Image (tube, grey):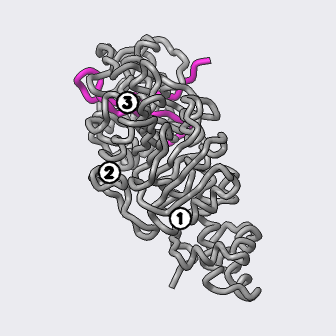
Amino acid sequence: MTRWDDGRMDRDELLEVLSPAGLRLLDELPPYESQTDVVRLVGDLRRAGHAPGTVAAVLSQAKLRRKAMGKFGPFAERMLFTEAGLEQATRLRVAALHAGRFRDAGVTSVADLGCGIGADALALASLDLEVHAVERDEVTAAIAAYNLMPWPNATVSQGDALAHPLSPGQGVYLDPARRTAGTRNTTRVADPADWSPSLVDAFAFGAERPTGVKLGPGVDRDLLPEGAEWQWVSVDGEVVEAGVWFGALARDGIRRSALALRDGAAAELTGAADAEDEAVIGLGRYLYEPDGAVIRARLIGDLARSLGAGMLAERIAYLSADELRPTPFAQAFEVLEELPFQEKAIAKALSARGIGRLEIKKRGADVDPARLRTALKPKGPEEGTLIITRVGGRHRALLARRASAQ
């Protein structure tokens, strides 16, 4: 029996949602917040004569639409989803940047091979590019077709991405499925050879035509081809993907890129190769925590040089400087006190400063922040940041506060 809140969808549920009654009911659902609201809403819909299957399917879709607002904004209100498809879908803002690469490279037709629910295909179509989207899973392909209905320049077909015929000059975009097939109870697939398509097959397109491949941000860098451009993207401080770009989609002279999207603005740090780290220096007045995209792109050294900073310790992604400079690529902290990594010493310093709202960060230290917070028992009206890391070769506790350059 289908539960309204299981976040899944099979063929029968899809048919319920896509029926005229299902779509009308989905668009007319009143807002709800709590489980009590849902129970009441289910009762109201059943008393109004709606079939149990339709109610379950529509409420499941409504839940996914709400969850999708973070990735798709108001577009989510007219889209359909599966749980697995939503999890792997590209955020619409990032998908727009992908589409812009193809447009700026002069590519007018793109095959989105393994399109999922159609997020990237939607962005491509909105730039008036001709889009041919292919998806292996029947339910997911049907959802992509629904999501792309407003764009006559986009088509969706169900089938094997590797068997889809390509026209001369056509670009390719791939987001290899890194979860088991289907929309129910999917699990992550660790081996790139078992992704769909496999990483080798995905990269093979890049040898022949303009190609973009979206991967998880933690992809093993040893698997990435040196001739391509590698770009890591963060959104509001969270690294969301690694993109590998081939042919005309790879920019001249750029092989490493960190793109930081925050508060509606975009900033990019690029390089021709991994950047050499700066030397380790003593602890300065300010500490910088580089954006995760900068760390994964290995451009920490370039960032350090732009800030007049040095490394706090070898192979630790913290930078130190005596001068505070504005940057979109790092969070800055003013160091208030350097302490030995001893709970009693830290607790005493927190008490002396009246710090009760405590943010705990760590790098290069085996620390459980939750256990440490319990042990320290911070109390008081002030707020601060405790950074557990190595300074030079020693483990230290840095009491700091967030800083911002004007």
Q: Position of residue 67 (x, y in %)?
A: 59, 58
Decide: few, some or many residues near mark 3? Use Cα within 10 Å; few <14, some 14-19, many ≥20. many
Q: Earlier in the sequence, mark 1 or mark 3?
A: 1
Question: Along the polypeptide, which appears first: circle 2 or circle 1?
Answer: 1
Contact? badges 3 and 2 (CB < 8 Å) = no
From the image, tell me which residue sits under label 1: 82
The answer to whether one can see residue 347 in this image is no
Residue 383 drawn in magenta: yes
**Which residue position holds label 3?**
228
Magenta residues span: 379-406
Q: In this view, does 25 lie to the left or right of 379?
A: right
Left or right of 25 in this view: 141: left
Q: Residue 198 carries which label?
A: 2
The residue under the point 28% across, 39% down is 223
Residue 388 location (% of width, % of height): 34, 33
User: Foreground residue, 140 or 314?
Assistant: 140
Q: Residue furthest front?
A: 168
Determine the CA span between mark 1 and mark 3.
32 Å
The x and y percentages for residue 279 are: 30, 13
| Label drawn at residue 242 | none
Q: Kindly identify the residue that appears in the image at 44 percent across and 38 percent down.
A: 211
Secondary structure of residue under mark 2: loop
Q: Which residue is drawn at 43% across and 67% down?
A: 182
Tag 2 near tag 1, CB within 8 Å: no
Q: Residue type at mark 2?
A: Ser
Judge whether 322 appears above or below 378 on screen.
Answer: above
Q: How far apart are marks 2 and 1 (CA)?
A: 22 Å
Q: In the rendered structure, does residue 34 fall within the stretch colored magenta? A: no
Q: Residues within 10 Å of mark 2 (few under 14, many from 20)?
A: some
- Please name which of the two marks, 1 or 3, marks the residue nearer to the observer: 3
